[in-house]
Image (cartoon, helix red, strand yellow):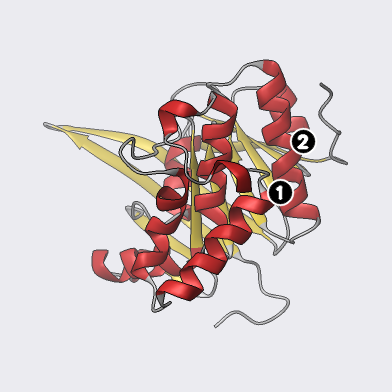
Amino acid sequence: MNQPDDPVVLVEDVCKEYRRHDQVLPVLTNMNLELQTGDYTALMGPSGSGKSTLLNLIAGLDKPTSGHIYVCGEDLSQASHGELARWRARHVGFIFQMYNLIPVLTAYENVELPLTLTPLNRKQRKEQVKTALEIVGLADRMDHYPKQLSGGQEQRVSIARAIATDPTLIVGDEPTGDLDKKSGNEILELMNRLNEEFGKTIVMVTHDPKAAESAKRTLHLEDGRLVGDTDVAPMEPTL
């Protein structure tokens, strides 16, 4: 279990390699990193730098080749795939570039989906879904299907789904990458609110320097190594 002053994410000497036939492809090399509770961190770097791989390791979607990753006090590098799935359901909310909503489900049903993996009863699930949709400003769209929503609204539903379980950690993979400038800024404002008002720890991959400016900290990766670490006061997105 995490102690109050322990980092929410601790990456120790992590290497990640992939094999292609007889080739070994190194993706991350001797990665060391600490993220504290309440951090809002952007991961930047060129394509192939390892940022998405690092995000997947932190989120428990993949395991390192060597080294250790502790998130919320759990050593993810030692967990089985079943243990990782249960851990993710409790601790991680995901925001994807392409929203990943199920088209035949309403906004309400999409947000409720991760809650069906919890012990909550139907009434409790309803309360948490309504709260999540209210936070993202879509309480009046809960019966709409994804095709009836704008791209920005779909991403808001995706964020509501990510926070419905009250996760410890929110991970975003290019959360504004498929949005126009206005919608992207609205999503960044919402993520700032989740961090500032609700104290959520957020890690996001982005290619967009403007999106990275909304975070409190920016980590720069290159060739699988951490080459820059910048703490900044977050800038308010401008419409």
The numbered dot on residue 40 is: 1
Residues at circles 1 and 2 in contact by the CB criterion of under 8 Å: yes
Q: Earlier in the sequence, mark 1 or mark 2?
A: 1
Q: Choose between 173 and 153: the one closer to the eye.
A: 153
Given the image, on which type of amino acid does mark 1 rest?
Tyr
Residue 210 screen position, x and y as percent: 74, 24
Measured as percent of width and height from the top left, residue 237 is found at 81, 29
The residue depicted at 74 percent of the width and 53 percent of the height is 195
Image height of 133 relative to 122, above or below: above
When the figure is inspected, residue 109 is found, relative to residue 24, above or below; the finding is below
Q: Is 133 displayed left or right of 13 in the figure?
A: right
In the picture as drawn, the residue positioned furthest to the top comes out as 180
- Total labels: the figure holds 2
In the depicted structure, whether residue 25 falls above or below residue 4: above
The picture places residue 56, in percent across and down from the top left corner, at 42, 47
Relative image position of residue 102 (x, y in whole percent): 34, 40
Label 1 SS: strand
Q: Which residue is mark 2?
A: 214
Q: Nearer the viewer, residue 229 or 82?
A: 82
* Quarter of the figure with the N terminus: bottom right
What is the crowding at mark 1: few (fewer than 14 residues within 10 Å), some, or many (at least 20)?
A: many
Query: Mark 2 belongs to which amino acid?
Result: Ser
Q: CA distance from mark 1 to mark 2?
A: 9 Å
Q: Quadrant of residue 147?
A: top left
